[in-house]
Image (cartoon, rainbow, N blue to C red):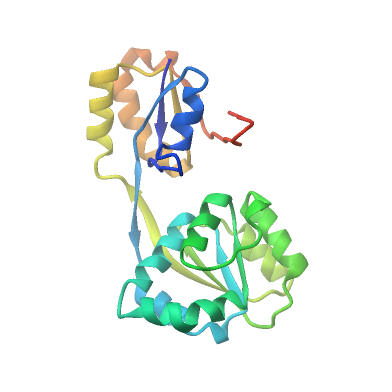
Amino acid sequence: MKVLLLKDPKEDDCGQDPYVRELGLYGLEATLIPVLSFEFLSLPSLSEKLSHPEGYGGLIFTSPRAVEAVERCLQKDAKAEVWKKSLKEKWNAKSVYVVGNATASLVNRIGLHTEGETCGNAEKLAEYICSRESSTLPLLFPCGTLRREILPTMLTDKGILLESITIYQTIPHPGIQGNLSSYYTQQGVPASITFFSPSGLTHSLKHIQELSGDSIGQIKGCATITLSFGNTLIS
């Protein structure tokens, strides 16, 4: 059975996207097509804030894209050397909160220790932070334009200071129409399509409807997909 996953491919330690590998174990032939792209914003401002860890109680990352923004900052203006010599150690003396193991892995890659990654979502992470945070300094929260307000609201309600900085925005992937058209030409109409975000659904649904034609009603659609490796859960 052919299934279409509307997401960026990401290789794991085995050199294969984990969704493709896990679904293959169940006889499903999965193809990945990215439908979203990202534009980074305010990187000079973020870089300046990262240079002054003494002004913050810690960091919060709720998306891999926010970590990528930090990585981009470290690649400019000889920041990487300063990061290795002093800044990384200073930030590691503070709390670095993250949502999800994938985001935690990226944060670890830039040399920071993490906590809270098993919380699963922003609301659970906010509860975790509220139960532990005692600093009188604000937490630095790099985020996107489509961030949910649940985490900032919960922290504010508990009197925990937060300094948000918007450092990326979500846009349609420039190759979405061409890639979908190529897939349908080569593979035909898939048995199932999985959307991984509301934005992905918004930017791809029109193209899928046009390409599927009368067969659209035969496609099984999922709004979310969750894989817990070792135990596979699909919803």
Q: Judge by depth and name the residue closer to the eye, 62 or 94.
A: 94
In this rendering, the answer to whether 173 lies above or below 194 is below
Q: Position of residue 149 (x, y in %)?
A: 59, 59
At a point 35% along the width and 67% down the height, the residue shown is 72
Specify the quadrant of the image occupied by residue 129. Answer: bottom right
Instruction: Decide if residue 146 is in sight here.
Output: no
Tell me the quarter of the image containing the C terminus: top right
Q: Position of residue 47 (x, y in %)?
A: 40, 77
In this rendering, the answer to whether 179 lies above or below 163 is above
In this rendering, the answer to whether 202 lies above or below 78 is above
Q: Residue furthest right?
A: 131
Q: Judge by depth and name the residue closer to the eye, 173 or 23.
A: 23
At a point 34% along the width and 24% down the height, the residue shown is 209
Instruction: Decide if residue 183 is in sight here.
Output: yes
Q: Judge by depth and name the residue closer to the eye, 110 or 178.
A: 110
Q: Residue furthest front?
A: 14
In this rendering, the answer to whether 231 lies above or below 111 is above
Judged left or right of residue 14, residue 140 is: right
At a point 57% along the width and 35% down the height, the residue shown is 227
Q: Judge by depth and name the residue closer to the eye, 174 or 205.
A: 174
Tell me the quarter of the image containing the N terminus: top left
Judged left or right of residue 69, residue 94 is: right
Judged left or right of residue 113, residue 146 is: left
Q: Position of residue 214 (x, y in %)?
A: 34, 13
At a point 43% along the width and 13% down the height, the residue shown is 218
